[in-house]
Image: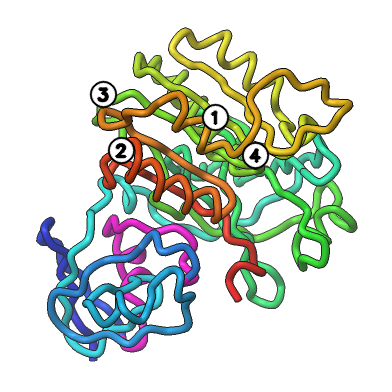
Amino acid sequence: MTFTATVQPAGRSFNIEPDEPVLQAAIRQGVGLPYGCKDGACGSCKSRLLEGRVVHGAHQSKALSADEEAAGMMLTCCAVPQTDVVIEARSVPGAGQFAVRKMPSRVLSITRPAPDVAVLTMQLPANDPLRYHAGQYIEFILRDGARRSYSMANAPHTQTDKPAIELHLRHMPGGLFTDHVFGAMKEKDILRVEGPFGSFFLREDSPKPIVLLASGTGFAPIKAIIEHLQFKASTRSVTLYWGCRSKADLYLHDWALAAAQQMPNLRYVPVLSEPRADDAWTGRTGLVHRAVMADWPDLSGHQVYACGAPIMVESAQRDLVAQCGLPADEFYADSFTSEADKH
């Protein structure tokens, strides 16, 4: 028997099949809920259960603690309703706007801008372009059914007569998929993808100044957002902070410098946590979110978009809200959880 979920305060209802998580049903029916990893690891989909009963599948306690669950919180990505449910969740206008689809993709090129970073360009079917918001991600469907998520690093308007998506992958030694990318993958290989997913994208109805916060390959969706802002000729003030260990890890440093030159309202602040002696680095050092705090002690009128390692995203969310007055609902994040992070 199917159950009904109602999302408040939006008042939207949708059906949920037996044994189907709430989020999966919402995505299937184009209902925009906040989410990130879909795997119970990041906590982006945390919502309040107002009525009804759910059973949670496997998830991490840092995403939802036992105390939070007892207090009526839930993770929509792994909560399976046992009754009709009423959920309090921020609806995300636009999250369900584009249908999630499966399609073949062909490797057009693989480049290595840094020793442990690959930039993949994947060709998509020409007559059927992938529609997505800058900041969203796709999933590769591997032969055994396992999935790996990567954000589009190019904005949607770049999908012209030869549609292709750009993806940034960090090599995780021992990682099933990245070992393959850095070892055996070659041009013209065909892989199946599904997307778009995620609620991490620009809230375009706001005039607020923007802080973009990236660590490592978390730069990928941030790059797409910058391209989109430029394409839309946005006049919003934008400051990009990109945190990496050493200069070599700023694998598109020249791209970011050029973007800041082309866009009068964009400022670029690279931050290195462990610069090497031969980097001859005279720029900012330390934790990237600390650089934001030093520059913006008052973020009460800003929006922050953060993407990268879970520890950076969690620290930024906690500290920017608690110490810099950032409204909690103006922090948007995509935590790059690896397979290792999910166990």
Q: Cβ–Cβ below 8 Å for labels 1 and 3?
A: no
Q: Label 2's element?
A: loop
Residue beneath disc 3: 207
Q: Which residue is mark 1?
A: 241
Between label 2 and label 3, give the one nearer the viewer.
2
**3D distance between C-alphas at marks 2 and 4:** 32 Å
Distance between the alpha carbons at the discs numbered 2 and 3? 15 Å
Judge by depth and name the residue closer to the eye, 246 or 51. Answer: 246
Q: CA distance from mark 1 to mark 2?
A: 16 Å
Q: Which mark is residue 326?
A: 2
Foreground of the two, 254 or 204: 254
**Type of amino acid under label 4:** Glu
Q: Residue at x 33, y 56 (%)?
A: 34
* Mark 2 in CB contact with mark 3 (< 8 angstroms): no
**Residue range of the region highlighted in magenta in the rendering:** 18-40
Q: Quadrant of residue 100?
A: bottom left
Q: Earlier in the sequence, mark 1 or mark 3?
A: 3
Say if the magenta span includes residue 30. Answer: yes
Tag 3: amino acid: Pro
Q: Amino acid at mark 2?
A: Leu
Sequence-earlier tag: 2 or 4: 4
- Disc 1 element: strand
Q: Nearer the viewer, mark 2 or mark 4?
A: 2
- What residue is disc 4 on? 166
Q: Secondary structure at mark 3?
A: loop
In primary-sequence order, the first of circles 2 and 3 is 3
Instruction: Pick whichever of labels 4 and 1 is earlier in the sequence.
Output: 4
Q: Quadrant of residue 85?
A: bottom left
Q: Residue 210: image x %, image y %?
A: 38, 27
Q: Residue at x 38, y 18 (%)?
A: 237
- Asked if residue 226 lies in the magenta stretch, the reply is no
